[in-house]
Amino acid sequence: MVEFAIALIGKLDGINRHSFNSFRLRVGINHGPVIAGVIGARKPQYDIWGNTVNVASRMESTGELGKIQVTEETSAMLQKLGYSCECRGLINVKGKGELMTFFVCTDMCKQQGVGLS
């Protein structure tokens, strides 16, 4: 998911350069168990639910444009996989209280000179 998010941010940057737009994307990622299923009789749709999904949504909504925000636990897992993450600090997350959050360091952030502090 992190590689996909990085690719999306990079692709959007390319689109912006060629179309003179300034679209920006913010991404929130979390990991953990989910409940998945198909709902609807007339128009079936696949969906996922659970705390993991809710926290990922909060990571997106409280994030910053052009960045990938993750929870402390997800940051620790990503660092074990070789990614660099920089601490954003405590963020008040609806329904969760204050959570320590991190931004995933990407080449795009470095190229744009975006500070991660």
Image (cartoon, rainbow, N blue to C red):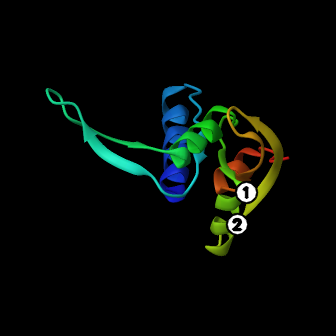
Query: Which residue, given by chain and number where applicable, does mark 1 sit on?
Result: 72
Local crowd at mark 1 within 10 Å, few (<14), some, or many (≥20)? many
Front-most of 30 and 116? 30
Give the percent coordinates (x, y) of residue 103: 72, 50
Residue 15 position in % (x across, y down): 48, 36
Q: Which mark is residue 6?
A: none
Q: Nearer the viewer, residue 15 or 84?
A: 84
Q: Is residue 78 left or right of residue 10?
A: right
Q: Front-most of 19 and 101?
A: 101
Q: Position of residue 78 (x, y in %)?
A: 63, 66
Residue with the most extreme left position? 42
Q: Is residue 25 above or below residue 35?
A: above
Question: Dot 2: within a 10 Å radius of its alpha carbon, few (fewer than 14), some, or many (20 or more) residues?
Answer: some
Judging from the image, what secondary structure is the residue with disc 1 in? helix
Against 15, residue 113 (above or below) is below
Q: Residue at x 55, y 25 (%)?
A: 21
24 relative to 89 in the view: left or right: left
- Residue 108 at x, y = what percent? 65, 50
Residues tagged 1 and 2 counted as in contact (Cβ below 8 A)? yes
The image quadrant that residue 23 belongs to is: top right
Q: Is residue 78 visible?
A: yes
Under circle 2, the secondary element is helix
Q: State the residue at coordinates (56%, 38%).
A: 57
Residue 26 appears in the rendering: no
**Res. 76 mark:** 2
Distance (Cα) linking label 1 and label 2: 6 Å
In the image, is residue 79 above or below residue 98? below
Q: Residue at x 71, y 64 (%)?
A: 84
Q: Amino acid at mark 1?
A: Glu
Query: What amino acid is found at the position of numbered circle 2 in the picture?
Result: Ala
Task: Place residue 66 in its image quadrant.
Answer: top right
Left/right of residue 34 with respect to residue 57 in the rendered view: left
